Image (cartoon, grey):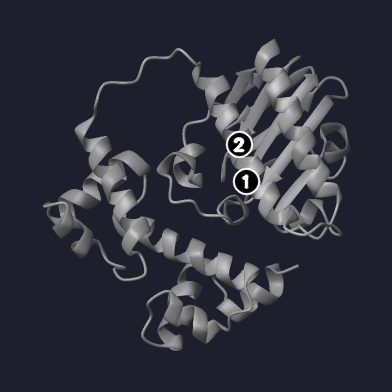
Amino acid sequence: MKQNIKTLQLHHLEKKHRLKNDLLIGPVAELFTRFDLKKHWRNRFYGIFMFKEASGSVVIDNQLYELGENRMLFLNYNQVYYFNPSSEPEGYAILFTKSFYNYIYTGNKLIRSDTALADLPPITEMNASFKKEFHESLQNIKKEYSGNRLYGKEIICMQLKIFILQFIRASAGQNELPAPADHKKETVEKFSELVNLFYKEFKTTAPYAEKLNLTPNYLNTLVKDQLAMSAGNYIRNRVILEAERLLLHTTLSVTEISYELGFTDNSHFGKYFKSANAMSPNQYRALKKP
């Protein structure tokens, strides 16, 4: 029987905090009381659960994983999941959106949301060393999250990036040997770097293919194989990510944002944005902005 999959967004779980559309931090047990665990959910945010004590299981994209002591659970965007806890868990959860993670954009390809979080496994064991690191990082994030101090949002964003890098290190292993070079993967990484440099200027595949000395069709095939989306959609996602960031975190008008992103007129930007979000930029800002 086909399951009814419901979409979960951060504002469904948190109504009052100033970052309710961007970030939620709290005890796992408390979070579990805010939605029906047995239903099938699809998140519009990332989720990291640090279990000090837990038992039962979680099913993610039809794969069953055991919950347990000193385990970390990672939920990616758009994964379908449901929980089967057999006892009340002890631990903390950090839930955050792509827009918030990229709020401070460094340009370093290792810590972008589309690369840093792409290959994290659903379950990671915390050994004593990493458990201490995670606890310290979590305490720093919680301290800023519970207050409302100057540059608090910026500090949380940078601390979150540190936390994610620690998570990657814990899941991959510090002594893991680098994988052999993969030409196709390297080409897609170069394409990704070019998109981050030129997304305001080029919004179609052809200019990027030319810079890489490839045909647009072949570049599109490589991107689909590596990223499970077309090159055009990857470019659009980068433009939309920046548009969302500017709408939520600046006071620029929609017209100013359209020119900032390289659109020749406000109408074109409005149609482009609506094709991705099913709402106009003004509607998005009114709905999502705290």
The CA distance from mark 2 to mark 1 is: 7 Å
261 sits to left or right of 80: left
Residue type beneath disc 1: Met
Nearer to the camera, 221 or 234: 234
* Residue 183 in picture, x, y percent from top left: 20, 33
Which label belongs to residue 92? none
Q: Position of residue 267 (x, y in %)?
A: 44, 87
Q: Residue at x 60, y 31 (%)?
A: 60
**In front: 65, or 254?**
254
Place residue 226 in its image quadrant: top left
For this view, does 229 lie left or right of residue 191?
right
Is residue 121 something one can see in this rendering? yes
Give how far across and how far down residue 184 sits, in percent. 22, 37
When the figure is inspected, residue 263 is found, relative to residue 70, above or below; the finding is below
Q: Which residue is mark 2?
A: 162
Tell me the quadrant of the picture where the C terminus can be found. bottom right
Residue in view at x 40 percent, y 83 percent: 268
User: What residue sits 73% from the left and 19% below the top?
Assistant: 132
**Residue 203 occupies quadrant:** bottom left
Q: Give the image location of residue 111, x and y in percent.
A: 49, 41
- Which residue is situated farthest in the front direction here? 150
Query: Eyeballing the image, is 172 above or below 285?
Result: above
Residue occupying image coordinates x 16% and y 51%: 212
Q: Amino acid at mark 2?
A: Ile
Residue 75 appears anywhere in the view:
no
Mark 2 residue element: helix
Name the residue beneath numbered marker 1: 158
